[in-house]
Every structure is written in structure tokens, then in C-alpha cells.
């Protein structure tokens, strides 16, 4: 499995900056929706909280708003320019290990 992840990271490293930025934006869009759902699920103690139906629009509105904020602060450009593949690899493994302990 580690070889597959290494190959994926190498393939991502070889992409042009614009493609890397697009991958980050797509990941952030999904991650923000998952984070909103997880916040409600954890807080209310059920995987599909009924209260989430009242604020469903958050799942549609917050991801693009957050990505626009990240873009306005030039976060994506900074991450691609100054953080190399070793950092991305280390961050991936650290976050994965942390998530396993949650």
C-alpha cells in the first residue's frame, strides 16, 4: 500500500502548478463538506443528525466561500511554491496517523 501512495505522490509532484492548485481546491471542497457534516454528527451523537436538514445550505455555501477566502489570501499559491513534496508526504502520514488515534 505504501508503494501505491508513494506513486500517487510522485504523480502529483510532477503535475504543473495549475493542476496542483486544482487538486487542492477539489480536495478542500470535499473536506469542508465532510468537516461540516462531522461537526454536526459528533456534536449530536448520530451519523445522520436531523438538525443538519435545517442547515443543508451550509454544505453548499461554505465550501466555495472558504475556497474564495483561501484564494484571496493566496494560500494555494504559497503552499505550492514554498512547501515541497517531502512536506506533503510527511503531512499526509502525520494526519493519517493522527486520524487513526481519534
Image (cartoon, grey):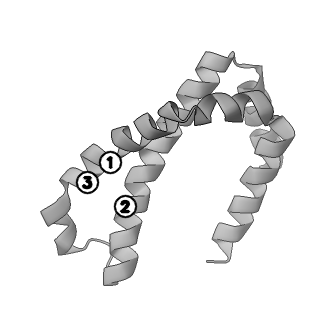
Instruction: Report if the CB atoms under discs 2 and 3 are less than 8 Å apart.
Output: yes
Question: Where 95 falls versus 89 (above or below)?
Answer: below
Q: Which residue lies furthest to the left in this view?
A: 54
Q: In which quarter of the image is residue 21?
A: top right
Can residue 55 be seen here?
yes
Q: Residue at x 17, y 73 (%)?
A: 50
Callout 2 secondary element: helix
- Where does label 3 land, which residue? 58
Q: How many marks?
A: 3
Q: Where is residue 22 in the image (x, y as percent from the top left)?
A: 54, 25
Q: Which residue is drawn at 36% across and 80% down?
A: 43
Question: Where 51 falls versus 8 (above or below)?
Answer: below
Circle on res. 48: none
Q: Residue at x 75, y 27 (%)?
A: 81
Q: Where is residue 77 in the image (x, y as percent from the top left)?
A: 64, 27
Point out the tag, 1 or 2, that comes first from the N-terminus: 2
Point out the tag, 2 or 3, that comes first from the N-terminus: 2
Q: In which quarter of the image is the C terminus?
A: bottom right
Instruction: Report if the CB atoms under discs 3 and 1 are less than 8 Å apart.
Output: yes
The residue nearer to you, when weighing 89 against 5, is 89
Q: In which quarter of the image is residue 76?
A: top right
* Eye-nearest disc, 1 or 2: 1
Position of 41 compared to 14: left or right? left
Callout 3 secondary element: helix
Q: How far apart are marks 3 and 1 (CA)?
A: 5 Å
Q: Distance between the residues labelled 2 and 3?
A: 8 Å
- Where does label 2 land, which residue? 36
Circle 1 crowding by C-alpha within 10 Å: few under 14, some 14–19, many from 20: some
- Where does label 1 land, which residue? 62
Question: Where 39 falls versus 46 (above or below)?
Answer: above
Can residue 7 be seen here?
no
Q: Residue at x 39, y 70 (%)?
A: 39
Amino acid at each position: 500500500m505504501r508503494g501505491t501512495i508513494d506513486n500517487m505522490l510522485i504523480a502529483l509532484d510532477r503535475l504543473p502548478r495549475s493542476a496542483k492548485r486544482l487538486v487542492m481546491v477539489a480536495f478542500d471542497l470535499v473536506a469542508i463538506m465532510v468537516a461540516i457534516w462531522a461537526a454536526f454528527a459528533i456534536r449530536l451523537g448520530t451519523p445522520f443528525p436531523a438538525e443538519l436538514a435545517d442547515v443543508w445550505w451550509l454544505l453548499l455555501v461554505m465550501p466555495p466561500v472558504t475556497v474564495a477566502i483561501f484564494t484571496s489570501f493566496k494560500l494555494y499559491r504559497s503552499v505550492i511554491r514554498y512547501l515541497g513534496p517531502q512536506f506533503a508526504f510527511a503531512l499526509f502520514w502525520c494526519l493519517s496517523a493522527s486520524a487513526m488515534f481519534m
